Image: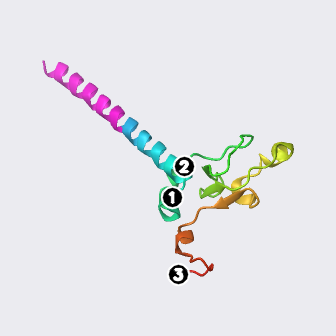
């Protein structure tokens, strides 16, 4: 009887852990979607950089999408994807080295006023 209860507890534990992981994944997905739509400020985005997907080479990106750079783990926002004619050459350049296409999301960005001065 004691062994059966332990198995039930273990099974309940795994089911609970799976439910919590699914809820956490859903929350992370929603956070990324809200960030990409501009509803979350850069300070919060920088603080939760680990939940953003890693940038992968040879994948097309759209304006506004956010990816984590594999070289520095910072989050970057796509500001201008390369044109189709240049995509093959530029799709291998990570965001941290492609200022023309990507803008770093920084916690300091929220502390800059309209004149470009730090507040």
> Residue at the spot x=53%, y=67% of the render?
107
Asked whether the viewer can see residue 51, the reply is no
The answer to whether the residues at label 1 and label 2 have Cβ atoms under 8 Å apart is: yes
Q: Residue furthest front?
A: 114
For residue 22, which quarter of the picture? top left
| Residues in magenta, as a range | 1-20
Q: Identify residue for label 1.
A: 45
For residue 8, which quarter of the picture? top left
Q: Nearer the viewer, residue 54 or 14?
A: 54
Lower position in the chain sequence, tag 1 or tag 2: 1
- The numbered dot on residue 52 is 2
67 part of magenta stretch: no
The answer to whether 109 appears left or right of 1 in the picture is right
Circle 3 packing at 10 Å, graded few (<14), some (14-19), many (20+), is few
Q: Residue furthest right?
A: 85
The answer to whether the residues at label 3 and label 1 have Cβ atoms under 8 Å apart is: no
Mark 1 falls on what kind of element?
helix
Q: In the figure, 115 relative to 6: above or below?
A: below
Mark 2 falls on what kind of element?
loop
The answer to whether 3 appears left or right of 102 in the picture is left
Whole-percent x, y for residue 90 in the image: 80, 49
In 3D space, how far apart are the residues under numbered discs 1 and 2 (Cα atoms)?
A: 9 Å
Q: Residue furthest left?
A: 1
13 part of magenta stretch: yes
Q: Identify residue for label 3.
A: 119
Mark 3 falls on what kind of element?
loop
Q: Looking at the rendering, in which quadrant would you find the N terminus? A: top left
Q: In the figure, 6 relative to 51: above or below?
A: above
């Amino acid at each position: 009887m004691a062994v059966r209860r332990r198995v039930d507890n273990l099974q309940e534990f795994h089911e609970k852990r799976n439910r919590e992981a699914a809820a956490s994944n859903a929350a992370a997905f929603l956070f990324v979607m809200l960030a990409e739509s501009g509803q979350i400020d850069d300070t919060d985005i920088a603080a939760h950089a680990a939940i953003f997907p890693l940038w992968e080479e040879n994948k097309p990106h759209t304006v506004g999408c956010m990816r984590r750079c594999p070289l520095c783990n910072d989050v970057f926002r796509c500001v201008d994807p390369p044109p189709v004619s240049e995509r093959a050459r530029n799709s291998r350049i990570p965001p941290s080295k492609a200022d023309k296409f990507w803008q770093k999301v920084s916690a300091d960005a929220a502390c800059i006023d309209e004149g470009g001065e730090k507040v």
